[in-house]
């Protein structure tokens, strides 16, 4: 069986078992801000609210907005100081600190996401490089940095993810038969997504398959059940441990090798390569390396099936250097590509060409809604794992913020089929 034998990472058990207490989260205090800056922020926020289909209610009883989902700002001074000093990072931290709230958070954030490109006046947009936060060097996705970045999210706790994911433990967009969706339909929709990717890649009996980004092993299990021989790579020790247990439980461990390995360290040649929502963790600096790796590992005549979250190209160009709340708290080192960026990187650096691309962002909005509702319903169980109220508010904001991106059309999710044309440049 073809494996990624060059991986130098020592395979050990997860460093933090799920039963270990979780350190309480602290939200930074509102940063110091000049009177002038806070006043400008207050005016910009008020101007934005006045033209949005929102209703904002401030602690002193004043209101703003054209009506719609309610936003309650409990501590306007702290809220404006945070937003003025740190933009969207401050906006998210203010929610984590309980300084504002919304009875229907996803609906309120959807309104903001739909108008994201116009929330900040054009003159301030042109000065973005002066006021926007920049990516910390510590989050670069070098081989060492990528392991740290992945661990911060995926090694939180297998038990945590199991509380809001369905039994397939699939942590990517499902593909429903119809919308709107309901919780009982989610496992079948996840399998529909996986099976479509395997079909695109032509995975069947005897296929040598490389998967980059194991998750908790559901795709590897379904590929092996088709008769494929699977090498799957992850940087998460907790995911590796549980995925191995799930593969063994399915009686497929002879067909699946789960390696703790960076994609850059993979070796061998494969008939097919599949990667589901992993490119978002690669970082723009390493997109060429990522796609060159797919190209190099693919046998002549092979296929690559890729699922990727995408953002509009103009927003990528405007925000690529900005440090975001999601990067600070949820996915360090992450960046969403655009369709245009994927086309440019593959065309310039590889022999891979897009043969097919299908978007289904509305399905991700529904997937996230189901996760968010499940997470909320099981808040007591999340707390019992040791995750405090600040963490739960953070995670709720993350799920609602992501849902809003897809529901507004600001974000999309694509399934790609790449084929190989000629030698790699």
Image (cartoon, grey):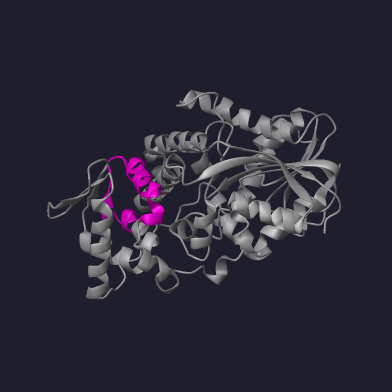
Q: Position of residue 418 (x, y in %)?
A: 74, 43
The one of 314 and 210 positioned closer to us in this rendering: 314
Residue 86, above or below 313: below
Q: How many marks?
A: 0
Name which quarter of the figure residue 60 lies in: bottom left
Rendered location of residue 405, percent (x, y): 45, 45
Quarter occupied by the C terminus: bottom right
Q: Is residue 85 above or below residue 188?
A: below
The furthest residue to the left: 61
Asked if residue 263 shows in the view, the reply is no
**Front in this rendered view, residue 412 or 74:** 412
Apparent side of residue 323 relative to residue 5 in the rendered image (left or right): left
- Which secondary structure dominates the residues rendered in magenta? helix
Q: Quadrant of the N terminus?
A: top right
Residue at the extreme front of the image, as rendered: 122
Magenta segment range? 94-118
């Amino acid at each position: 069986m073809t494996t990624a034998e060059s991986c130098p990472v020592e395979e050990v058990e997860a460093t933090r078992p799920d039963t270990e207490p979780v350190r309480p989260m602290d939200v930074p205090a509102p940063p110091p801000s000049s009177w002038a800056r806070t006043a400008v922020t207050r005016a910009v926020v008020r101007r934005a609210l006045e033209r949005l289909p929102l209703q904002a209610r401030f602690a002193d009883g004043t209101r703003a907005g054209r009506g719609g989902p309610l936003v309650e700002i409990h501590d306007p001074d702290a809220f404006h100081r945070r937003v003025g000093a740190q933009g969207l990072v401050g906006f998210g931290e203010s929610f984590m600190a309980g300084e504002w709230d919304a009875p229907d958070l996803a609906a309120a954030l959807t309104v903001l996401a739909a108008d994201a490109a116009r929330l900040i006046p054009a003159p301030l947009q042109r000065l973005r490089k002066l006021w926007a936060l920049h990516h910390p060097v510590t989050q670069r996705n070098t081989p060492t940095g990528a392991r740290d970045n992945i661990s911060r999210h995926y090694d939180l706790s297998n038990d945590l993810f199991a509380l809001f994911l369905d039994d397939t433990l699939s942590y990517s967009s499902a593909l429903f038969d119809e919308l709107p969706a309901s919780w009982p339909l989610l496992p079948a929709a996840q399998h529909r997504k996986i099976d479509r990717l395997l079909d695109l890649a032509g995975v069947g009996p005897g296929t040598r398959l490389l998967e980059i980004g194991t998750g908790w092993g559901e795709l590897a299990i379904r590929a092996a059940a088709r008769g494929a021989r699977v090498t799957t790579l992850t940087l998460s020790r907790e995911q590796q441990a549980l995925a191995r247990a799930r593969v063994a439980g399915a009686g497929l461990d002879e067909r699946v090798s789960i390696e703790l390995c960076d994609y850059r360290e993979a070796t061998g040649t494969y008939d097919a390569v599949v990667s589901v929502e992993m490119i978002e963790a690669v970082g723009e600096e390493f997109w060429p390396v990522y796609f060159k790796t797919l190209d190099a590992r693919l046998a002549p005549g092979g296929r690559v099936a890729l699922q990727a979250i995408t953002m509009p190209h103009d927003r990528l160009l405007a925000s690529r250097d900005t440090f975001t709340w999601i990067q600070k708290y949820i996915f360090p080192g992450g960046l969403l590509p655009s369709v245009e960026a994927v086309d440019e990187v593959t065309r310039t650096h590889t022999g891979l060409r897009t043969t097919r691309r299908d978007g289904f962002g509305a399905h991700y909005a529904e997937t996230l809604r189901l996760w968010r509702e499940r997470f909320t319903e099981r808040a007591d169980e999340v707390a019992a794992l040791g995750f405090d109220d600040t963490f739960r508010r953070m995670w709720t904001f993350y799920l609602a913020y992501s849902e809003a991106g897809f529901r507004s059309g600001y974000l999309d999710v694509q399934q790609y089929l790449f084929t190989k044309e000629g030698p790699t440049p």
